Image (cartoon, rainbow, N blue to C red):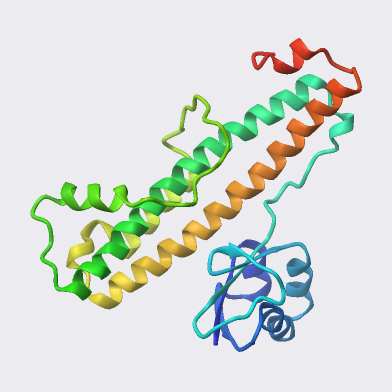
Amino acid sequence: MAQLLLFASAREAAGRSRDTIAGATVADVLAAAKRRFGPSFETVLSSSTVWLNGQECEPHSPVAESDEVAVLPPVSGGSQELSGMTLEEVRARRGSLQSEEDAVSFVRRVVQGRLDLARDEIRRRASGESPQRDVTDGITRVFATERGSGSTRPPRDTEVVADHQLLRELESLCDSIGFGGLRELDDAEVDACVQRLADFELVVSARRKELFTQIDALSAELVRRYRTSTASVDTLLDESR
């Protein structure tokens, strides 16, 4: 039975955040979900991204026992009609979205780090290994493990807002699941901690991907205006304008 994870408007349409649904493929699981949750859910699903175990997938992707199928509706607000925007508006909008992406990517790194620590606690208990007397030793080892999910985009100077809404939500989540006392949690509580953090990471990653899509559209519009000579190269390249 697949674990169906529902976020934002999909959760509202279904009246729950998760369910267990049988299906041999992603398409089978979603078809069963549409029958179970009705027309409102089907409408939301038509514009949503679907992930299998944290990765985008095809409808025919096979689903094994305990796999996670996540329904991620698009970020509210939608795309703007770029052709009707002035050059200054395009640049300002892109700059605003880049700042938001900086913050979201920061939160994503934080939640991934905490998720790694929770998973390492499960590994430590399973191996019978004694906890590190100096907790920083364990943190260094966990964070030194290579991750393959980084962005391929070139680095930029960033200024992360420490009071971002997603960061506040993460801190509230960690308080509610007892992350600060990870070693004092029982095994079931640690498992629940991993699950809740993994669910939150899905939401943050979906938000980050949507921001990338919007930023790319705005960048493409700037390139289009250069190619059609509606803006000078100097104006397009000058980030201060």
Compared across the picture, whether 195 is left or right of 211 comes to: left
| Residue nearest the observer in this picture, 241 or 120 | 120
Q: Quadrant of the C terminus?
A: top right
Q: How many marks?
A: 0
Instruction: Point out residue 95 in the picture as x, y percentages from the top left corner.
Output: 64, 27
- Residue at 48% of width from left, 64% of height from top? 199
- Residue at 58% of width from left, 75% of height from top? 16
| Residue nearest the observer in this picture, 224 or 174 | 224
Instruction: Point out residue 205 in the picture as x, y percentages from the top left corner.
Output: 55, 53
Q: Which residue lies furthest to the left in this view?
A: 133
| Residue nearest the observer in this picture, 71 or 168 | 71
Residue 74 higher or lower than 96, as above or below: below
| Residue nearest the observer in this picture, 134 or 127 | 127
Quadrant in the picture for residue 194: bottom left
Instruction: Point out residue 34 in the picture as x, y percentages from the top left corner.
Output: 73, 81
Residue 179 higher or lower than 86, as above or below: below
- Residue at 69% of width from left, 37% of height from top? 215
Compared across the picture, whether 108 is left or right of 7 comes to: left
Quadrant in the picture for residue 227: top right
- Residue at 34% of width from left, 58% of height from top? 116
Residue 19 higher or lower than 142, as above or below: below
Residue 184 higher or lower than 151, as above or below: below
Instruction: Point out residue 134 in the picture as x, y percentages from the top left corner.
Output: 11, 50
Compared across the picture, whether 202 is left or right of 60 comes to: left
Compared across the picture, whether 24 is left or right of 184 comes to: right
Q: Quadrant of the N terminus?
A: bottom right
